[in-house]
Image (tube, grey):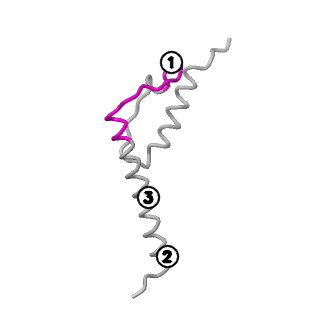
Amino acid sequence: MQDDPLRAIQRHNDLKAFLRYENALRAAYAQSQNPQPPRWGNSSPGREFKATVSSMHLVEDKVVRLTDYWQKAHQPHRS
């Protein structure tokens, strides 16, 4: 019994998504076991703004938003 091509593609994409998620979890666990402070000079971006996400697929969007907030907060004030 053969699978149709679309089902095989979907199964392949699901496996790739799972492996990306698993790698992200392993990296987060490793970082939590050996935390290293970022070395970005005097100020550390991200320490002033924190967020919680309910799912792994929301992380990238949240990082973009927090980076934008940080850049707006630290740009020189215009007179």
Q: Amino acid at mark 1?
A: Ser
Tell me the quadrant of the picture where the C terminus can be found: top right
The span picked out in magenta is 28-45
- Nearer-N-terminus badge (1/3): 3
Residue 17 is marked as: 3
The residue at the far right in this view is 79
Marks 2 and 1, how far apart in space? Answer: 49 Å
Residue 43 is marked as: 1
Element at badge 3?
helix
Q: Amino acid at mark 3?
A: Ala
From the image, state whether disc 2 or disc 1 is nearer to you. Answer: 1
Vertical placement of residue 69 versus 62, above or below: above
Tell me the quadrant of the picture where the N terminus can be found: bottom left
- At 37% from the left and 36% from the top, the residue drawn is 31
- At 37% from the left and 47% from the top, the residue drawn is 55
Horizontal arrangement in the rendering, residue 67 relative to residue 59 (left or right) = right
User: Disc 2 marks which residue?
Assistant: 6
Cβ atoms under marks 2 and 1 closer than 8 Å = no
Element at badge 2?
helix
Q: How dense is the environment of label 2, judged by Cα within 10 Å: few (below 14), some, or many (20 and up)?
A: few
